[in-house]
Amino acid sequence: MPADEPAVLDHLEPRLVVGSEVAFHGVIWDIVAEDVDLGGVDGESRVVRREFVRHPGAVVVIVLDDDERVLLQRQYRHPVRRDLWEPPAGLLDIADEDARDAAARELAEEADLVAERWDVLLDYYTSPGGSDEAIRVFLARGIRGVPAADRFEREDEECDMLARWVPLTEAVALVLAGAVHNPSTIVGLLAAAAARAAGWSTLRPADSPWPERQTLTR
């Protein structure tokens, strides 16, 4: 790569926001309208309006047991009118909660499981052209069940979730065959397979920095 070519590396590079308003205030997330100066040649102003979903962020848990099977749960998602097979996941909607702690909480609440080992598989944005939602995907291993007396009482769409333990290789085949469509399922399973192929050398510590969550609005 020539010396003057930029590295292929995402980095924080905010543009000047000259106006911002909440166009819609929702129960979980808001829709924000912002006037952004993109800049231009010779220092000229180039202001555009962009509307996007302001999201608290989320965590996803790819659960891998000793037989290299992953846990998938079927949950109804109303916007797409479908039951989707997904890994355990949840919003970062508790103030100052650590991402790994949130992932452990979601794993216990949604799957009645705890894990001895936690690693970061990857971080990604779900739809950066229309939302600031950032997701951290963890790999959880050393799995054991939560005692019956300590199990969380699930509600709403989580009440009747089915669970399946699927061999990782088979789960990846389902992704490539177009059988599953949740983005965290797809991203998480492919990342887990790639990490396994690399002898797990690509995993990051569970407390690794997460700069992807930095925005001007938080």
Image (tube, helix red, strand yellow):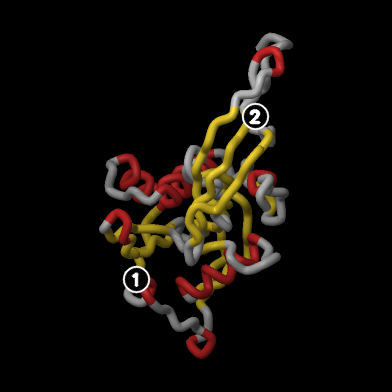
Asked if residue 65 can be seen in this view, the reply is no
Q: Who's the residue at 60% across and 66% down the image?
A: 102
Name the residue carrying label 1: 161
Q: Is residue 29 above or below residue 209?
A: below
Amino acid type of the residue that numbered disc 2 sits on in the rendered structure: Leu
Q: Is residue 128 above or below residue 152?
A: above
Q: Who's the residue at 58% across and 65% down the image?
A: 93
- Tell me whether the residue at label 1 lies in contact with that at label 2, contact meaning CB atoms closer than 8 angstroms: no
Q: Quadrant of residue 12?
A: top right
Q: Secondary structure at mark 1?
A: loop
Residue furthest to the top:
2
Front-most of residues 5 and 145: 5
Asked if residue 166 can be seen in this view, the reply is yes
Q: Who's the residue at 71% across and 18% down the image?
A: 43
Q: Is residue 44 left or right of residue 182?
A: right
Name the residue carrying label 2: 9
Residue 123 position, x and y percent, is 58, 46
- Category of crowding for the residue at label 1, using alpha-carbon neighbours closer than 10 angstroms: few (below 14), some (14–19), many (at least 20): some
Q: Quadrant of residue 4?
A: top right
Gap in Å between the C-alphas at discs 1 and 2? 38 Å
Q: Secondary structure at mark 2?
A: loop
Amino acid type of the residue that numbered disc 1 sits on in the rendered structure: Met
Residue 151 position, x and y percent, is 49, 83
Mark 1 or mark 2, earlier in chain? 2
Q: Who's the residue at 53% across and 69% down the image?
A: 106
Image quarter of the N terminus: top right
Residue 161 position, x and y percent, is 34, 71
